[in-house]
Image (spheres, helix red, strand yellow):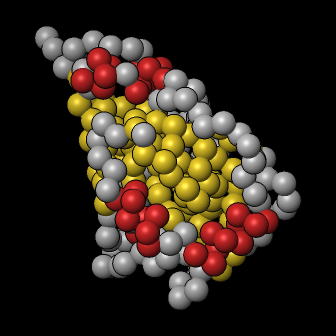
Amino acid sequence: MPWKRIALLGLVGWGLFHFVIAPPAEVVATAIAEHHPLPEGAPLLSIAEPPRQGDLVAAPRRLPVEGLDVRVVPRATFELTARVLSSRSYRLGRDARLSPLDLALGWGPMAEEPVIEALEISQRNRWYYWRTDAPPPIPPRTIALNSSNIHMLAGDAATMASLKRLEAGDRVTLRGHLVDIEGDRWTWRTSTRRTDTGQGACEIMLVDALVVH
């Protein structure tokens, strides 16, 4: 009997749906970068390394986004070099007003071609899934520890356009901040751990810069 496994990494779902366009949050991104600067002079991570997360140098501020009834709250600096496992755009739901794109990203063993080729990878409903009809090439826990579904925000339209051009197989370095999104009656919280799985395990990343390798 074929061996099948499905892993569900990260969930965000909202009951209110409508067509939206994600506006640039340039003022917010600039304020976060100035108040919580990224480490200077740090070498780019290799794809074999896990993401680099740093504490904020000052108390986080709740920064309103012009034209939207939400605030962005930085939680940590964040950088990773990874392979794109899958990309999925979203236009429905209040979360898509700021984050219209999810990237499933892998590093370490989850960036290796034989491992990726052995897995069927997909995204929907802001989840990242993997599946195989055979024993997985690496232990499921190793898959979970070396990959993530990340909800993407960008400070300007050009950065978001660059993120949307990424395709499965691309290698990219992303630098920015993990953030929470707060509305009047709802909150969307980022994960700040690489060891969690399931609901709430996705990171929400405001991207300051990216390099495609």
Compared across the picture, whether 154 is left or right of 169 comes to: right
Residue 168, horizontal then vertical, whole percent: 29, 41
Residue furthest to the left in view is 1
80 w.r.t. 210: above or below: above
Residue furthest to the right in view is 58
Quarter holding the C terminus is top left
Q: Which residue is more in the foreground, 170 or 103?
A: 170
Compared across the picture, whether 176 is left or right of 129 comes to: right
Q: Residue at x 40, y 27 (%)?
A: 111
Compared across the picture, whether 133 is left or right of 37 comes to: left
76 w.r.t. 168: above or below: below
Compared across the picture, whether 110 is left or right of 167 comes to: right
Is residue 103 visible in the rendered image? The answer is yes
Residue furthest to the bottom in view is 67
204 w.r.t. 4: above or below: below
Q: Residue at x 61, y 54 (%)?
A: 176
Is residue 187 visible in the rendered image? The answer is no
Residue 75, horizontal then vertical, whole percent: 71, 55
Residue 25, horizontal then vertical, whole percent: 55, 75
Q: Residue at x 39, y 48 (%)?
A: 103
State which quadrant residue 140 falls in.
top left
Q: Residue at x 75, y 48 (%)?
A: 40
Q: Which residue is more in the foreground, 27 or 197?
A: 27
- Total number of numbered discs in the rendering: 0
Q: Which residue is more in the foreground, 45 or 134?
A: 45
Quarter holding the N terminus is top left
Residue 113, horizontal then vertical, whole percent: 31, 22
106 w.r.t. 108: above or below: below
